[in-house]
Amino acid sequence: MIPVARRVLFWIVRLGVALVLVAAVLAVGRHAGGGALIVTASAATPLSITCPPPITAEADQVGGAFVVPGTATATGDGVTITGPSAAVYPLGTSTLTYTAFDNSGASVSCQTTITVVDTTPPVITCPALVTAEATGNESAFVVPGSATAFDIAGPVTITGPPAASYPLGTTNVIYSATDQSGNSSSCSSAIKVVDTTPPSIVCPAPVTAEATSPAGASVVPGAASASDIAGPVTVTGPSGAATYPLGTTPLTYTATDFVGNKSSCVTTITVVDTTPPSITCPAPITAEATSPLGASVAPGAATASDVVGPVTVTGPSGAATYPLGISPLTYTATDGAGNTSSCVATITVVDTTPPSIACPAPITAEATSFAGAMVNPGSAVASDTAGLVTITGPAVGTYKLGTTTVTYTATDQSGNQSSCTTTITVVDTTPPSITCPAPITAEATSPAGAMVNPGSALASDTAGPVTITGPAVGTYPLGTTTVTYTATDQSGNQSSCNSSITVHDTIAPSITITTPAHTVYAIGQVVNASYSCSDIGSGVATCAGNVASGTPIDTSSAGTKSFTVTAVDNVGNTSHQTVTYDVGYNICTLYDSTKAVQSGATIPIRLEICDAAGNDLSSAGITLTAIGVTQLSTSISGPVMASGNANPDNNFRFAGPGYIYNLSTKGLSTGTYALSFTISGDPTIHTVYFQVK
C-alpha cells in the first residue's frame, strides 16, 4: 500500500505540470497589455510576491498628502497582482496590502506602509502696535490685538498676551502659532501706554472769616486735593496761617503729575465783620400785683461791648405800671459797623393770693323719683383783690337719696383757687302707695275650704323700689277671711290695704244609687237598697232614700216602681236622684220545651206565673196575651197562631192550675222557636221556647 504522504506529493506534481501547460496555452492567446501581470513559464513556477519599500511623504494639504504607492513584483504561472492606488493618505502611517493570483487561482499577499508627516511650521502674522492712554497706577488695561496664522496641513492654535494692565511705556508681546503636529512659529508686537491727561485738582472751599481786629483776621487756608490716574501728583499753593484784610483775597493752587501735565484752581478767603456787639440784659423782675391793673416796676439797665469799637444801647427806663403776666423788655446794642444785638428781659407781675369764697347753706329735699330729687344747690360768693373771680360748683340736677357733699371753687385770673363745701341731703319720708287685689270668692273644694291664690297687690313709691308682703297661696276656710297687704319702701316707710277671700259652697251634694238598678226584679225577690251621698264642699248633712241603704226595696207587686234618694249638705244645698225599676212575674213552665213536635201539629203551651220563690200566682183575673213567634236560628219573627177557638184574641186560657195556649206550628220549619207574650200589670215581655221537627 502506498503511504498517504507519497500519494499527496504525486498529485501535487501532476497538478503543477497541468497548471504550467494551461498557462502556456493562455499566454499564446492573451495580449500583453492586459490589466493583470501575466507570467508565462514553460514549466510550473512557485507563486511568490515582493512589496515595494515603505514611503514617507510630507503633508501637502489639509488632512494628509497625495501619494502614488510603489509596485509589487511576483513570480508564478500566469500571475496577476492587485494593490493600492494613488490617493490622499492621512497624516500618520497607513498599511498597504498587495496580493498575487496565479492561473490556478492560488494567491499570496504582502504589506508595506505609507507614512504622511507634517514637519512644516505654520505661518503667523502679529497685530500692529497698540497705543493706550494710562487709566491708573501708571498703567492701562489693554486688550491686545489678535495674530493670524495658516498651516497647509490643518488647523492652527494661536496663543498671545492676555487682556491685562500694562505699565507706562512700551511692552513687547509674543504670539505663537502651533499646528496639530506640534510645529510652531512666533512673532512679536508691542503695547505702548502713554500719559497725556493732566491731573484733576479740587481747591478747598472758600473761607469766610470774621474780622477779629481792624486789620482783618488770621486765617489758615485749606489744602487743595489732586489726583492723576497715571501716578503721583505734586500740589503747590498757599499754606500756613496769615492775616487777611477785610474783603476777598483769591488763592491759586497748581497740581503737576510726574510727566509734567498741570492743572490749576482758584478759591478765596473773605474777611467780614458781621459779629454784633455783645449785650447783657438786666435780670428778670417778678412783682406781686397790687390792683387789677398790675404792679408799678422800675426796669434795670442793660450792658454791652464790641471788640471793634464803641456801642450804643437803647431800651426801657423809668418806673411804669405793668399788667398781670409776663411783659418782655427788649434792649438793643449797635456797634460802629451797624451790627446790632438785642436781648430780652422780663417783668412778671404775678397774683399768688387766692380769692376768698363762701358756700351756700346746706339743703334738705324730699325725694321725688327713684333717682332722688331735683335740687338747685345755690350759689357761692367770692372776691379777689387782683381782679375777676370765676366760681365753679355743682349744677342744678337730680341728687340721690342720702347726703351728697358738694364743692365750690373760686379761681382768680391767675389760677389761684379757694374752695368750700356744703351738703345736699335728699330724704324719703313719704310712704309708698298700695292697691290691694279685688276680693276673691272661691267655691269650697273640701270641708276645710278651698285652695286660693290671694293675688298680688300693686305698690309704687316715687323714691325707689317697694317690697310688698301679703297673704300666701293656701287653703282658706268657708266664710270670709280678711287679708292684709303691706308695702315698704327702701327708707322703711310703710302703707297697708285690706282685701277679702270668701269661700262658699253652692254645689249640691252628689248621689250614687247602686241598687235598685234600672232593671227587672221578680215579685217577692229580696233586693236590698244600696246608695251613697258625697259633697266636695261643706260635707253631707243627710242622705236618705225610700228605705235605708242596706234594707229591701218594694218588690211585692208587678209594675214599674221608683226609688228616690235625697241628699242635703251642711249649708243646706239639696239634691235628689230617682231610679225606676220593674217588678214582674217569673214563668214556671208545665210542658217539656225540649220535646219537638211535627211541623203543623199543635203544641199546648202550659205555664204558671210565679213569684221569686216559685209560688203559683195564676188567677183568672190576670191576662196573658201571645204576641209573636221567632225562630232563633234565623231571628225571623211572625204572628202567633192559635189552634182552634180555645184562645180568642191570642189570650192564654186560665185552666187551673195555670194557663194554656194551643199553639199551631202550621208553616213552621224545623228549629227552635220563642213564643213572646205579655202579662197584664207586668211591664215586661216574657218568652217561652218550643221545638219543631
Image (cartoon, rainbow, N blue to C red):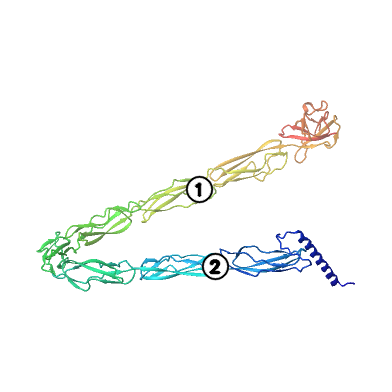
Q: At 66% across and 64% down in the image, what residue appears? A: 84
Q: Quadrant of the rendered structure where residue 248 is?
A: bottom left
- Residue indicated by mark 2: 180
Q: Quadrant of the rendered structure where residue 345 is?
A: bottom left
Q: Which circle, 2 or 1, is nearer the viewer? A: 2
As drawn, the residue found furthest toward the right would be 1
Q: Is residue 431 left or right of residue 598?
A: left
For the C terminus, the image quarter is top right
- Residue indicated by mark 1: 478
Residue 201 lies, in percent from the top left, at 28, 67
As drawn, the residue found furthest toward the left would be 318
Q: Is residue 249 left or right of residue 87?
A: left
Kindly state the secondary structure of the residue where label 1 is placed.
Answer: loop
Q: At 79% across and 26% down in the image, what residue appears? A: 648
Inspect the image, locate mark 1, and give the three-letter code of the amino acid beneath it: Leu
In the displayed structure, 450 sits above or below 290; it is above
Residue 117 lies, in percent from the top left, at 58, 69
